[in-house]
Image: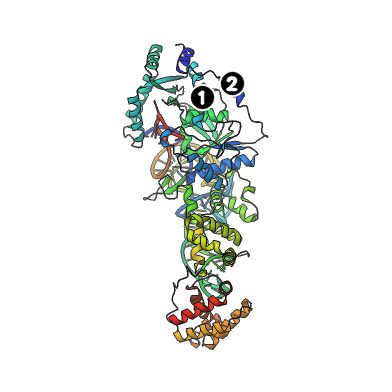
RNA sequence: GGCCCGUUGGUCAAGUGGUUAAGACACGGCCCUUUCACGGCUGUAACAGCAGUUCGAGUCUGCUACGGGUCACCA
């Protein structure tokens, strides 16, 4: 068969040659060792939390080596495409601090290796498709519209897996061999009839033979050669992931392909395509998937439907960007935490990220750990930073609270400053949403009396103590002087002025200073627990302190 | 079912032939403490199993088991 003629019949409009493209997209001139990485999401309007892992690796590797990190949109599956999704992706990744050097941006493409959206690269794919046909390595398969419709409905049912694996494999093999047989005349008449064709690459592998590949995280792999014909172009002329991956990553000069390990089974196909196309394959890193626990306690791939699968959810739940990024980093490089405690003042980006420290197996997403990381992150922030964080969150998630905070920034910051900044800062917040319940009693609109005075204490004693507290209060007292007065009050109502005294001889007293402090706390904050009382009262001011205590006395 | 990948405490994990098998989270206890939040000390808890190589194996090899992934004109 005259393959060149076939190629011309199939792709009459393609005049550009692979050499032209090589010239247009030359090797990048980058420093020695610079890595070119990319993330290539589908525009589904959804960015998976698991996707943050490869994305972070890509970003770190590229920027740590003086290379290029770019964004390519893989919109080759029109069925799944969502309007405006590309913009959503750039926005969320930018929010998480993943900044691209090149690729699709809000203001169009940036960089010399574009277009960076696959649907705009169809002409490019066809150049290589034609080349493969001309070389006898690819062939068309014609289908009528009805057959295509049938395929599409089958697609949707692809999740329903067959039980007859062996029979299926046999049938598929037969079908494949049959597809490869056709004559030039048949092609001519199909084309004349206006039928569309998909393009398949002929597999030349023997699955009994293994090829050795080095994966940068998995190590040396032995995978069987590919013996399944690979779909290059779908009937609509759009490439499959496999073909687009080979063409794009070569032309865009990607040095390191970093992706989830679900791609491992098709690596053999990809290597075959790179060989057919005469491209040097990139280095591969297949990173372990993020897992979740299913109802039976087994690990499962963290899929789209699962809670917390959408990266956007973490913003909504009130996790700070830093917390999520730190958590991701602790999972990616297990020595990160150690480094961070040793270098508390350094930025996350100063950490020497290492491929060698990456885990080979998938890990469970651990919310407890995320919360712990998050508490540490927030505890190191200044009151102003916390204020900004909470406001950013509340603005969309709790507008009323946002308005409350905005009304008096200084007041809010003074609350947030309690117990902050020292060597042992408070760690009250894992998420921004924790802030409101923590500080709500400082605001009259949110103040409520949740906890009652201890039932085992005499009401008159409580009243007396509270009255004395109001009378003795002097805003010029320092913390020690203030507390001394509280001790005096305790003594006056027959309570021990030291907790230790009470513990030694509990029968001698009705209670201790701690109890008195508790009366005051409950009267003022409405709860048994609060940040440092002395600070609380200072912020609240004498006036409101007095009002609340008086109100509390009246309730007794 | 075929193929591929994996398996150290509940979770994340150090560990590259000789260790009392780190550390972090979670959980328990004690201490500190006017509550809370910290902090300090401390405890429970692990090399999936079986063979083999070796003077010696969590580390190397093989098998088994278990878990995961994948087998689309989806990515």
Where is residue A104, by image quadrant?
top right
Identify whether A232 is placed above or below B6: above
Is residue A145 toward the left or the right of residue A426 in the image? left
Q: Badge 1 local density, few (<14 within 10 Å), some, or many (20+)? A: some
- Can residue A152 be spotted in the picture? yes
Identify whether B12 is placed above or below A376: above
Q: Chain of mark 2?
A: A
Which x, y percent locates residue A358?
55, 44
Q: In the displayed image of the protein, which residue is found farthest to the right?
A: A31
The answer to which of marks 2 and 1 sits earlier in the sequence is 2
Which x, y percent locates residue A384?
60, 60
Q: Chain of mark 1?
A: A
Q: CA distance from mark 2 to mark 1?
A: 13 Å
Which x, y percent locates residue A175?
35, 23
For the residue pair A380 and A470, the one nearer the viewer reads as: A470
Residue annotated with mark 2:
A20
For the residue pair A255 and A155, the one nearer the viewer reads as: A155
For the residue pair A185 and A206, the one nearer the viewer reads as: A185
Which x, y percent locates residue A537?
56, 74
- Can residue A361 be spotted in the picture? no
- SS of the residue at dot 1? helix
Q: Badge 2 local density, few (<14 within 10 Å), some, or many (20+)? A: few
Q: Residue at x 43, y 33 (%)?
A: A78
Identify whether A150 is placed above or below A491: above
Of the numbered discs in the image, which one, if any, rests on residue A195? Answer: none
> Image quadrant for the C terminus of chain A?
bottom left
- SS of the residue at dot 2? helix
For the residue pair A218 and A460, the one nearer the viewer reads as: A460
Q: Which colour style is shown?
A: rainbow
> Image quadrant for the N terminus of chain A?
top left
Residue annotated with mark 1:
A123
């Amino acid at each position: 068969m005259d393959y060149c003629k076939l190629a011309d019949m199939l792709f009459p409009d393609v005049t550009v040659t692979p050499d032209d493209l090589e010239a247009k997209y030359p090797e990048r001139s980058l420093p020695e060792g610079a890595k070119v990485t990319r993330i290539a999401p589908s525009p589904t309007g959804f960015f998976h939390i698991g996707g943050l892992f490869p994305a972070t690796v890509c970003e770190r590797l590229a920027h740590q080596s003086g290379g290029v990190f770019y964004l390519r949109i893989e919109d080759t599956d029109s069925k799944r495409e969502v309007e405006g999704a590309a913009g959503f992706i750039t926005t969320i990744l930018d929010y998480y601090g993943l900044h691209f050097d090149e690729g699709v941006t809000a203001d169009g493409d940036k960089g010399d290796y574009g277009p960076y959206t696959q649907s705009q690269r169809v002409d490019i794919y066809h150049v290589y498709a034609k080349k493969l046909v001309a070389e006898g390595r690819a062939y068309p398969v014609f289908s009528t519209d009805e057959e295509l419709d049938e395929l599409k409905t089958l697609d949707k049912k692809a999740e329903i897996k067959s039980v007859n694996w062996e029979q299926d494999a046999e049938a598929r093999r037969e079908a494949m061999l049959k597809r490869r047989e056709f004559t030039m005349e048949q092609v001519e008449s199909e084309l004349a009839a206006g039928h569309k064709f998909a393009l398949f690459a002929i597999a030349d592998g023997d699955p009994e033979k293994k090829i050795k590949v080095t994966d940068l995280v998995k190590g040396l792999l032995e995978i069987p050669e590919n013996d399944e014909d690979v779909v290059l172009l779908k009937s609509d002329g759009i490439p499959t992931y496999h073909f687009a991956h080979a063409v794009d990553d070569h032309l865009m000069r990607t040095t390191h392909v970093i992706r989830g390990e679900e791609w491992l089974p098709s690596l053999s196909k990809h290597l075959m395509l790179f060989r057919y196309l005469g491209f040097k394959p990139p280095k591969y890193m297949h990173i372990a998937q993020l897992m979740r626990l299913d109802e039976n306690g087994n690990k499962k791939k963290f899929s789209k439907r699962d809670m917390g699968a959408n990266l956007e959810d973490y913003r909504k739940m009130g996790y700070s960007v830093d917390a999520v990024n730190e958590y991701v980093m602790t999972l990616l490089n297990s020595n990160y935490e150690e480094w961070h405690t040793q270098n508390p003042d350094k930025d996350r980006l100063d950490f020497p990220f290492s491929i060698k420290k990456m885990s080979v197996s998938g890990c469970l997403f651990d919310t407890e750990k995320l919360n712990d990381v998050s508490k540490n992150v927030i505890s190191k922030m200044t009151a102003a930073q916390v204020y900004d964080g909470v406001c950013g969150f509340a603005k969309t998630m709790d507008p009323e609270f946002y308005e409350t905070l905005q009304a008096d920034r200084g007041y809010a910051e003074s609350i947030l400053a309690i117990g902050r900044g020292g060597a042992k800062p408070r760690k009250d917040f894992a998420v921004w949403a924790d802030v409101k319940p923590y500080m709500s009693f400082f605001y009259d609109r949110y103040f409520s009396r949740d906890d009652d005075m201890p039932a085992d204490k005499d009401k008159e004693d409580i009243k007396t103590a509270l009255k004395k507290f109001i009378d003795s209060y002097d805003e010029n007292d320092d913390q020690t002087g203030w507390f001394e007065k509280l001790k005096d009050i305790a003594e006056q109502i027959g309570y021990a002025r030291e907790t230790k005294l009470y513990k030694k001889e509990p029968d001698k007293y009705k209670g201790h200073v701690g109890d008195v402090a508790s009366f005051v706390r409950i009267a003022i904050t409405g709860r048994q627990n609060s940040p440092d009382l002395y600070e609380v009262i200072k912020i609240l001011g004498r006036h409101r302190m007095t009002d609340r205590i008086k109100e509390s006395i009246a309730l007794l």
